[in-house]
Image: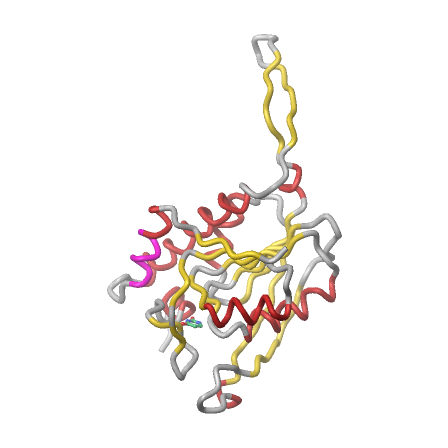
Amino acid sequence: MGRVVVIDHPLAQAILTALRDRNTKQIEFRKGLVRLGRLMGYEIVKSMDIETVEVETPLGVKAKGVRIRDLDHVVIIQVLRAAMPLVEGLVKIFANARMGVVSARRVEESHIPGSLDFDIEITYVKVPRIMEDDILIVADPMLATGSTITSVLKHVFKYGNPKRTIIVSVIATKYGIERVLREYSFAEIYTVAIDPEINEKGYIVPGLGDAGDRAFGGP
Ligand code: URA
């Protein structure tokens, strides 16, 4: 069922603070997103089903342990290009994940002054088949208006219906979260912060600026 998880781990919060800092340069910014991807992956694992198993150690003694069956059923979709470092971190946790990409662009000219919504142009979709026991993780570092993620989900669900749908965003807004949950009430949103505002250009405030430009260079 739909839910929002705000990761308040001090390490995640400290990394986010560095990402917000305008003085943080491109390489450090990208590294920060990778580290957050890994931490957010740990947090997702906490909600996965665990089964008890028994192994025999080199001492010939039995030891009880756990197996996380869901780890073999993860599909990660990255929204190009800003999600690339975040996914690099997620893959360190979900090493067996099947992966897909979606290229999405806000059509700036479609923006009506006073409105928060944008048209989204999807120019490339490559997604593996999604099975009913899969956990789908869609990574996009900034969940601002929800226009991009709802368009992406519409395309991704053409490839199948997963057991769970998790959106991984470093910063979200209440507006974006409500929009996603209105359209996809079962979605689970993992984020490190919920920021209060979206400005007239669609940027999250205080936010961290344009995540793609800061990670890869840009105007
Ligand atoms: N995308 C970004 O990169 N930054 C924002 O603030 C909003 C959307």
Front-most of residues 114 and 65: 114
| Residue shown at the point (57%, 79%) measured from the top left | 120
| Residue shown at the point (53%, 72%) measured from the top left | 146
Q: x and y percent of residue 156 in the render?
A: 67, 65
* Region rendered in magenta: 14-20
Q: In the image, is residue 10 above or below residue 16? A: above
Front-most of residues 113 and 131: 113
| Residue shown at the point (63%, 55%) measured from the top left | 1
Q: Quadrant of the C terminus?
A: bottom left
Q: x and y percent of residue 214 in the render?
A: 36, 67
Q: Is residue 38 left or right of residue 32?
A: right
Which color scheme does this rendered protein use? secondary structure
Asked if the magenta segment contains residue 18, the reply would be yes
Asked if the magenta segment contains residue 163, the reply would be no
Q: In the image, is residue 127 above or below residue 135? A: below
Q: x and y percent of residue 98 in the render?
A: 65, 51
Q: x and y percent of residue 134 in the render?
A: 69, 50
Locate residue 71: give its quadrant.
top right
| Residue shown at the point (64%, 66%) measured from the top left | 184
Q: Main secondary structure of the magenta part?
A: helix
